[in-house]
Amino acid sequence: MNNDLLFLTKKIGPRISGSVNAKKALNWARKRMLEIAPDTVYLQEVVVPHWERGANEKSFFNTGRKKTEMKVCALGGSIATNGLLQANVLEVKNWDELDLISDNEIRGKFIFFNRAMDPKEIETYKAYLGAVDQRSIGAIEASKRGAIGVLIRSLTLKADDIPHTGAVSYDINTKKIPAAAIGIKSANLLSAALANNPNLMYSLKMECMALPDEKSYNLIGEIRGARFPHEYVTAGAHLDSWDLGEGAADDGTGVVQTLEVLQILKNLDQRPERSFRAILYMNEESGAHGAVQYAKEAREKNETHIAALESDAGGFTPRGFRVDGSLTVVKQIKTWMELFAPYKMGEIYQNQRGIDLLPMKGLSKALISLECDDQRFFDIHHSASDTYDKLNIREVKLGGASMSALSYLILKYGL
Amino acid sequence: MNNDLLFLTKKIGPRISGSVNAKKALNWARKRMLEIAPDTVYLQEVVVPHWERGANEKSFFNTGRKKTEMKVCALGGSIATNGLLQANVLEVKNWDELDLISDNEIRGKFIFFNRAMDPKEIETYKAYLGAVDQRSIGAIEASKRGAIGVLIRSLTLKADDIPHTGAVSYDINTKKIPAAAIGIKSANLLSAALANNPNLMYSLKMECMALPDEKSYNLIGEIRGARFPHEYVTAGAHLDSWDLGEGAADDGTGVVQTLEVLQILKNLDQRPERSFRAILYMNEESGAHGAVQYAKEAREKNETHIAALESDAGGFTPRGFRVDGSLTVVKQIKTWMELFAPYKMGEIYQNQRGIDLLPMKGLSKALISLECDDQRFFDIHHSASDTYDKLNIREVKLGGASMSALSYLILKYGL
């Protein structure tokens, strides 16, 4: 497992969908699945967006004769700036503040969305949800009002200056404007400078671009069930990552855990009662096209899906599972948790959080996401800091064991 | 809290008892306590051992003309080698294996204790307990049989080559022999080389030395209780550390958490019902002389101690508390845990693990150690890897909040 994680992060590295590295990751994972040798290993075609950051990202602001460099990165999917884009900046922390400003004032300016993730929220994911709207729809809302670009305070709880990317949305009725994430220290500097000098001039240069969509694939390794081969349990993770860092926590850990589940189930003396699929989804990070395609085909084939598991929570110490399903299903899974409790990973939480599971809602009886200690995740999430050295292999292994055990139980007893 | 931890780890750094750095840490902590301004801040004199590693640690073995360097460090308290100590090596994994070898065979050789911590043990501390006997009494047992030195496989679950120190015991009836910890990769290399060539020549040089005992101090910050001033609740950690790394996880985190508890209790509008002492113990790592002294004086003064809390488990995400106390006491603490459960830190475990609490057994109604996620602790424990960058400040803060909340409840309601 450690070798898999080292290879994926260090030999392949970041693997944004549509990229050469995504292809390399797919080839490597296919080779690994063939080594594990379940009954079948196959690819499922899916068309994915292909966006590239480009070479030069540069940003600074001028106050009088002083130039202050900013740490920024383009949000995933952003358009380029077409040279140096220069304008004044309006800082807002929420939509109400944006509403209070007239179109006239906004026109031709950058909007700087500077609402921090709430450090008092015990669950960092909830803190993330409380701030991610700025990144996801900030460019649309700002553009509607006449802004020429958006700067988003990085979505992290760590007080460093490494910018965190992530998908930006555009809509077809609104002009696309460049969108950049800005490091926390840079964001604080800019905010302080704006307080002194609201008319400072901000400059941003990004050369990112959307390329034509690419043909890519989900990767599936399948073990046929002995008694109910037409009932499926799946466990998966996403093979793509953002282009910064090494895609280690997000979602390299989930990828190697998924391979581990497949290996463990293959190693058992007996074939499982139901059929199992290990799925490595392509393109979770910018549209979940892979997961949408998987669910589409499963529906078209009228497949019976008992449970879909996903690991995409960073690969830290597992605490339990998040489950979406009927009361009966949740109750059944809870009874099994006494087997997990001695390993301190037996908690059941409401509302699963796997993006790649959402398209299976209504088709699979249970959607189950691995829940991990999340204190460190957003320190590194979507940034150049998401590297192998931030992980602990024992924690990753515990997650793999946990996913394997629950997959085994559902394969054996159903839901 | 982050500033405190940065200062302690980066500006002061490692602080073995009796050292100049231990004095610096004491002065800094006293200044911080005076800033917090509880009712009193005072020092409690304690005599501590003073051992220094010395400049040159060197180790290698020769097989034919090939020389293989080993990563080693002296165990804390070890005697020096008096130049290059050269001898053959006998590898053993347990005491039975040692018993099976004749005195004749052992005489004049190194004993290499190479039992690994059990990676299958979910609690890393239990894996540590299953291997630490080699370090603590290996030198005595080997010396009794005529060995001239011991090499101990480092007590860690990480497969790197950084040696981990820790206290070695000698006894007055047995000749002291040099004792070194050896990195995991080095230990594996040595083991493989011995399998091929049992007569290889091993060389070890260490210039460590015991200096005269030093006068040092525990540091105590006290807030007098409003209703029951003669009933004490204490929360503490140890200020000393080993001399490698920065004493970050062990026990810098506990130190800043202890200061945090004092600060939070001081910030409250009302004085607590009972008296509170924040205690920074000196010399946990090589004899717990500070804790012994504290308990001795508490007994001499006939003090009533309700609960003694300690944080010395690495400062990772808190999971709950380990409690030693009567059934009634444990039951009472368990009822409070519903307040901690929403923060996922509400578990109560049996058997507290704070070394500095042991001398209070029988005197304090409850001994309580903070329980943290422990997957990463022994990766860095007692080694050059125990540095600030391995920590996550949110996790440390959660531990501080958890200690503060339980201290508050016991101060208010008693036990």
Image: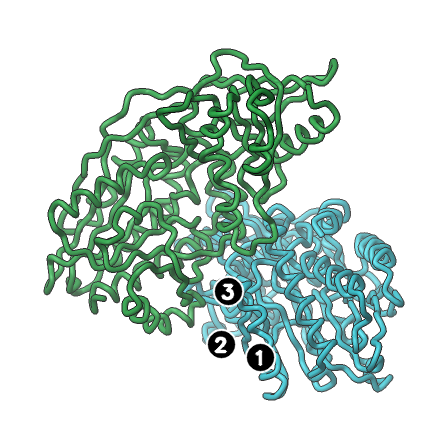
Chain colours: A cyan, B green
Secondary element type, mark 3? helix
Q: Amino acid at mark 2?
A: Asp
Q: Secondary structure at mark 2?
A: helix
Name which residue type carries label 1. Thr
Callout 2: residue from which chain? A
User: Residue at image x 52%, y 42%?
Assistant: B131
Question: Residue A99 — which label?
Answer: 2
Residue A414 can be seen in this image: yes
- Cα gap from disc 3 to disc 2, whole angstroms: 28 Å
Looking at the image, residue A31 sits to the left or right of residue B25; the answer is: right
Mark 2, mark 1: which one is toward the viewer?
1
Which is nearer the N-term, disc 2 or disc 1? 2
- Badge 1 marks a residue whose secondary structure is helix
Residue A282 in sight: no
Instruction: Give the distance between the C-alpha atoms of the residues marked 2 and 1, in whole angstroms.
Output: 50 Å
In the picture, the disc for residue A335 is 1
